Amino acid sequence: MKTPEKQIGARMNRVDGRQKVTGAATYSAEYQLPGITYAVLVGSTITKGRITSIDTKAAERAPGVLAVITHFNSPKVPGFDTAGKDPSQPATVGGPIKVFKDDKIRFNDQPIAIVVADSLERARFAAGLVKGQYAQEKHQTSLEAAKSQAFLPTSAKKNPKHPMNDYQRGQVDAYKTGAIKLESEYVVPTEVHQPMELQAITAHWEAPDRLTIYDKTQGTMATRRDFAREWGLPEENVKVIATYVGGAFGNALHSWQHESAAIIAARVVNRPVKLMLTREQMFTMVGYRPYTWQKLGMSATPDGKITAITHEAIGQTSTFEEFTESTLAQTRMMYESPNLTTRYRIASLDVNSPIWMRGPGEATGAFALESAMDEMAHLLNIDPLEFRLRNYTEQDPEKNRPWSSKFLKECYQLGAERVGWNKRQLKPGSLRDGDWLIGYGMGVGTFGAHRGSSKANIRLLPNGTVLLQSAVTDIGPGTATAMTQIAADTLGLAPEKIKFELGNSNFAQAPTQGGSAIVNTVGPAVQEACLALKEKLRTLAASSNAAFASAKKEDVVFAEGYLTLNGNPAARVPFADLLQQVDGGFVTVESKPQGNASKNYSMYSFSVHFAEVRVHALTGEVRVSKLVSCADAGTIVNEKTAGNQMKGGAVGGIGMALMEHAIIDDRFGRYITKDFADYHVPVHADSPDVQVAFVNKPDPYVNALGTKGIGEIAIIGVAPAIANAIFNATGKRIRELPITPDKLLV
Amino acid sequence: MADDNPEINLSEAGGSHNEARRTFLKQSSLLTAMTFAPGPIVQAAAAQFDEKVAAAFEKVPLKLEVNGVKHKLSVEPRTTLLDLLREQLHLTGTKKGCDYGQCGACTVHVDGNRINSCLTLAVMQEGRKITTIEGLANGDNLHPMQEAFLKHDGFQCGYCTPGQIMSAVACIREGHANSEGEIREFMSGNICRCGAYSNIVAAIQEVKNGGQKV
């Protein structure tokens, strides 16, 4: 029998591609439920204070309006009254605002009312008639102004081993006494995820104690838990469906007030309620990458060995949740430095809570670290790539243990060749093409190769195909495609005969999609489920064919219409016979990391990004003419989708470097960037043909597949690569993102 | 009733027309309405809730052909083509990404030309032929652009994809796909936040160079 082609590593087209190119893919606001109603949120016009009154009369009288809900008339939400810590959210400290619970305003455009009507137009019109009156208090929305009130996160205060604590190896702030030293401040402003699909939810109370929500979420199970707790329901009474998620980038890692509001509204009108935020509300009612100030000091020897680094960061959070991220993680482990200090603080502002945005803190931290690496290389008159090689870490200097795998040097080589690094001149401003100044820069990224525990359901169907189910979502990387490939190889079955269903909290337990961990985590569960199915079928086959009794599960092979054994094609049992014996249910398998590998090894994915930029000498316009991203992400399950993910991260990095900047007018606490006309993201014309290269060597310890994760390293290090290339082109060092033309003309 | 009024000409200046119509509703129609209309409308009128009264008459007739299917509709003038497609015709392949014509997710063809369906009121398209992503394939046979997007992985989350594909087809038809740079320029109204731009451009180039009729 012909051995099936290996699918892991194949450039397979997406299994859900046809749905996406024909418009058949159904996102959260696209479920046609009988009796559907439409909701529109009204936000506060002040930033801090109390609501004194809300005039809802005109809205209530407007045609088609079914309900106008505010804190004055909102029904009791049982979970809102639970004593002590907020039960509904996984926040480390504090908790999100309980929508329509009280009269407090904690940020601008905080939802104060939800209007439900029988059509979208009518709901929108009526929402415009709702008028709030407020008692205003003085607010603070500027991190620069609040820096002096920054504090160590409570999570760190409570637990001395928490990674948000100050870190020290060698001497404190030793860079200050170094012979060759630099000290610079960096700013990454607030950036907003702005996925193309607006945040949307369709909430449907199927019975007074049974809730179904079609929701834009990265974790169906986390969302189920949140709203089950909020409504005091058993988790099995809440169903969360997110079959397709139109991008998220971290934006849907948190349950937001609009979701609670839609569920309350559906309760009140006793009909399904559809709520889609507007693009403006995507700046205010959901999270964002927090404005972060950083200071980095570094000293080195004349021959290019780093002697000390101190990296400090202050990020913004809200007044009601302590948001933290690993802004300083990369600095602690990327380069050899005998003396190293990191200090992380947060400052509370009258804003909505931030939420991790792609690459999260590491991308912010890498802007400072990788810019400083370039600055030091320039100070030492050493090629920045050579400088990084001289400080390369062969083992983790933070935890003093070996890497599970690290092929970053291979990445450096691949990338340098492809971008044409040999054309780079040490002296900035050396390359010119007419009015265009040309420069080259690089930036390194790393992110933990995380693996959690996960389950998978598997079932043989009567037609000889296999159905797998997982509660995991797919925000775009191609989860179902990768899982189908993994299953195909494990089962020895053609991918067309495998269906991987996801995005439903009733399916097998899986983690939230985030932190580059899905293939690492769900992949092994799929593998093990496939083996469990094989074993189950082998046992069943053994009752009618003795050859199966002594066979190993790995040798069980699927063929057209029957089950057979590797190396023994004579042994065959028709599926029809097996199916008569199968109980028809799923085999559920749980997969967890085994052994001590994660304690004995430091597990990280690595990337390096090389940029060639052209900067117009007269206008300051920056064009990224080449972008090469190379990754050591372990085994690449699908180079087509993985490559696409890398390209997407690189494009996100262009946005971070050159244009993304969410601006609050601090006088009013309100965003003045409120749509794509004000908040610029990269378009086709901003993006070069991004080149991607993978080392594609399996990691021996993360899991049996050898994967390490891609999502974050795709963007971490891109912004500094571009900033460094701009310095190389112009001699101008811009330490405050985004690098807009005005900054290059002064 | 206004729904049956054949003389509504939407090319007239909006303000004066609306004003005239509102006055008409208030004066003459209201009297007729009060004779025939159900109680709530009469009560509403009596309470001078002219907004509510007007609402009972505010739908206008609209004839459209969408993906080859002729529709006789009755829509509110303020309904955008995008919301009509998504919420009333249940053609949710056309996506809402901003409502301001800034992102291109809602791109459809009107008489073969690409437009942002969020920037046009449905009633402005009287008599026109609309093609949405659902109408691009020929039955089970995908349009060459859809095939090329699949092959080149011209998407990730898929949300901007219908708009990208509709725009890409029009981009070739317009003669704006002669080079990578030209494609990037003329596709810049369609944002892909996942950043699949390189792959989208590759898909468009393949269709353009393949010479198939789009």
Image (spheres, coloured by chain):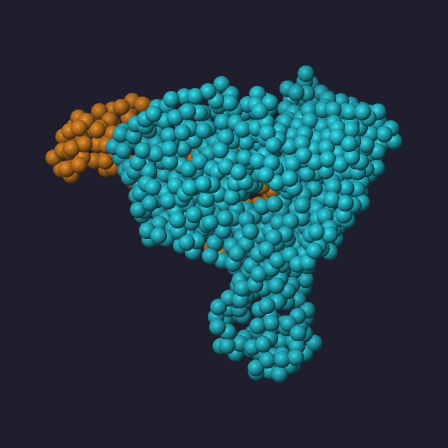
Place of residue A43 in the rendered image (x, y in percent of width and height, measured from the top left): 40, 30
Image quadrant containing the C terminus of chain A? top right
Residue A21 in view of the camera: no
Image quadrant containing the N terminus of chain A? bottom right
Q: Which residue corresponds to the image point at 61% horizontal and 67% vertical from the top-left?
A: A531
Reply above or below: A256 against A405: above
Q: Which residue corresponds to the image point at 44% horizontal and 25% vertical from the top-left?
A: A48
Left or right of residue A134: residue B199: right
Q: Which residue corresponds to the image point at 75% horizontal and 30% vertical from the top-left?
A: A172
Residue A338 in view of the camera: yes
Shown colour of chain B: orange
Place of residue A73 in the rendered image (x, y in percent of width and height, measured from the top left): 30, 36
Reply above or below: A663 against A625: above
Q: Which residue corresponds to the image point at 27% horizontal and 33% vertical from the top-left?
A: A60
Q: Which chain has been coloured cyan in this picture? A: A
Q: Depth check: give the residue in front, A353 or A719.
A: A353
Reply above or below: A10 against A119: below
Place of residue A196 in the rendered image (x, y in percent of width and height, measured from the top left): 51, 39
Q: Depth check: give the residue in front, A489 or B214.
A: A489
